[in-house]
Amino acid sequence: MTMIKIKLVKSPIGKPETHKRTIEALGLKKIGQVVEKNDTPQIRGMIHQVSYMVEVID
């Protein structure tokens, strides 16, 4: 399975609670942190929901 790298670029402070939980579920805690996840439709949906706070790295 292919992997996808996700980087947190904006703080979740002051954002909707559901978006904060999504960031937490992706395993992101600090700005600039990068996590590697399997490229699945579920992960892609989570990225889409918080796309204004995260960046996908090739």
Image (cartoon, rainbow, N blue to C red):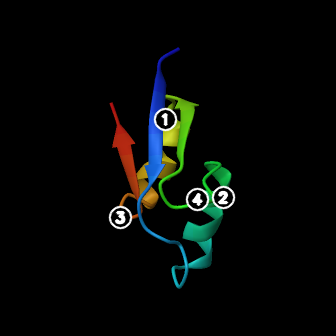
The local crowd at label 4, few if under 14, some if 14 to 19, many if 20 or more residues have their Cα within 10 Å, is many
What is the C-alpha distance between the residues marked 4 and 3?
Answer: 11 Å
Q: In which quarter of the image is residue 51?
A: bottom left
Viewed as shown, does residue 18 lie left or right of 51? right
- The residue identified by callout 4 is 23
Viewed as shown, does residue 30 lie left or right of 51? right
Q: Please report contact status of discs 2 and 4: CB closer than 8 Å, yes or no.
A: yes
- The residue identified by callout 1 is 41
Q: What residue type is labelled 4?
A: Ile
The local crowd at label 1, few if under 14, some if 14 to 19, many if 20 or more residues have their Cα within 10 Å, is few
- The residue identified by callout 3 is 52
Nearer to us in this view, 49 or 10: 10
- Helix or strand or loop: what does disc 3 sit on? loop
> Which x, y percent locates residue 7?
45, 48
- The residue identified by callout 2 is 24
> Which x, y percent locates residue 58?
33, 30
What is the C-alpha distance between the residues marked 2 and 1?
Answer: 18 Å
What is the C-alpha distance between the residues marked 1 and 4?
Answer: 16 Å
**Residue drawn at x 51%, y 30% as measured from the top left:** 40
Q: Quadrant of residue 17?
A: bottom right
